[in-house]
Amino acid sequence: MIRINLLKEEPTGPVITAKEEVIKEKKPFPMTSLIGLFVVAAIALGFLQFNAIKKEKTLLKEVQEEKEKLKDVLVKLERVQEQQDLIMRKIDLINQLKSQQGVAVSILDELSKNIPYWVWLTEVSFSKQQVQIRGRAIDLNLISDYIYNLETSPHFQNVNLASSNRRQVRGNEFLDFSLTARYVFTQPPQPVTKVGQKGAN
């Protein structure tokens, strides 16, 4: 004879509900693990910062070494530039003197041609068409004659007596005088073609 028990059997142990199982699964994260992760992250960040600082120091050292190497080069370049500037100033001065060489000869020639007897020139300077003339004369009338001769010359304008001082040396009296004048540039004379001269082919 077969017997079937249709009554529900009573549980013999403690019954765990679904809610208790969910609560059991959601255990709190251990604090030791959290601290460990923080320590690892801090160490990693510090290591990265240390490497970055070390790299920056290396680059700075390389730049400073390169700067020291270039320091001597910069000093040499400055010296070369100074020498070049000095040479250029000398060249400009030589060119200026060459350009004024003909003018100086012309001025001295005109001053000598118009000077009266018993008048001597001691110094002549020329700058930007302004001529400074210093000399000696026996008396004031000779200085006046010299001024007149220069004024009638086509090469001089605005001839003025700047100063005249009487001096006596070894019993001889004379006048130290100073004149100022403006030199007038004239066109160079054109070459004269001789009669019967054939032009160049």
Image (spheres, rainbow, N blue to C red):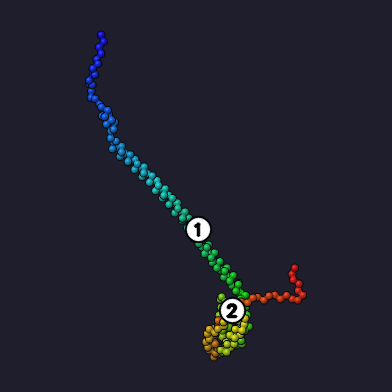
Q: Quadrant of residue 159?
A: bottom right
Q: Position of residue 62 (x, y in %)?
A: 45, 51
Q: Which amino acid does label 2 sit on?
A: Tyr
Please indicate whether residue 154 sits to the left or right of residue 77 in the image: right
Q: Where is residue 198 in the image (x, y as percent from the top left)?
A: 76, 72
Tell me the quarter of the image containing the N terminus.
Answer: top left
Q: Which of 73 and 198 is in front in this view?
A: 198
Please indicate whether residue 80 sits to the left or right of residue 154 in the image: left
Q: Nearer the viewer, residue 201 or 82?
A: 201
In the rendered view, would you say 100 is above or below 114? above
In the rendered view, would you say 108 is above or below 41? below
What residue is drawn where x is 45% and y is 53%? 63
Q: Which of 196 and 173 is in front in this view?
A: 196
Residue at the spot of label 1? 73
Residue at the spot of label 2? 183
Would you say residue 123 is visible in this rendering?
Answer: no
Q: Quadrant of residue 191?
A: bottom right
Mark 1, other Cα within 10 Å: few <14 / some 14–19 / many ≥20:
few
What residue is drawn where x is 28% and y is 33%? 27
Going by the picture, which residue comes out furthest to the front? 6
Please state which of the two labelled residues, at mark 1 or mark 2, is closer to the viewer.
Answer: 2
Going by the picture, which residue comes out furthest to the bottom? 171
In the rendered view, would you say 80 is above or below 55? below
Do the residues bearing badges 1 and 2 touch, measured as CB atoms within 8 Å?
A: no
Would you say residue 88 is visible in this rendering?
Answer: yes
Question: Real-space Cα distance between discs 1 and 2?
Answer: 50 Å
Disc nearer the start of the sequence (1/2):
1
Q: What element carries label 1?
A: helix
Tell me the quarter of the image containing the C terminus.
Answer: bottom right
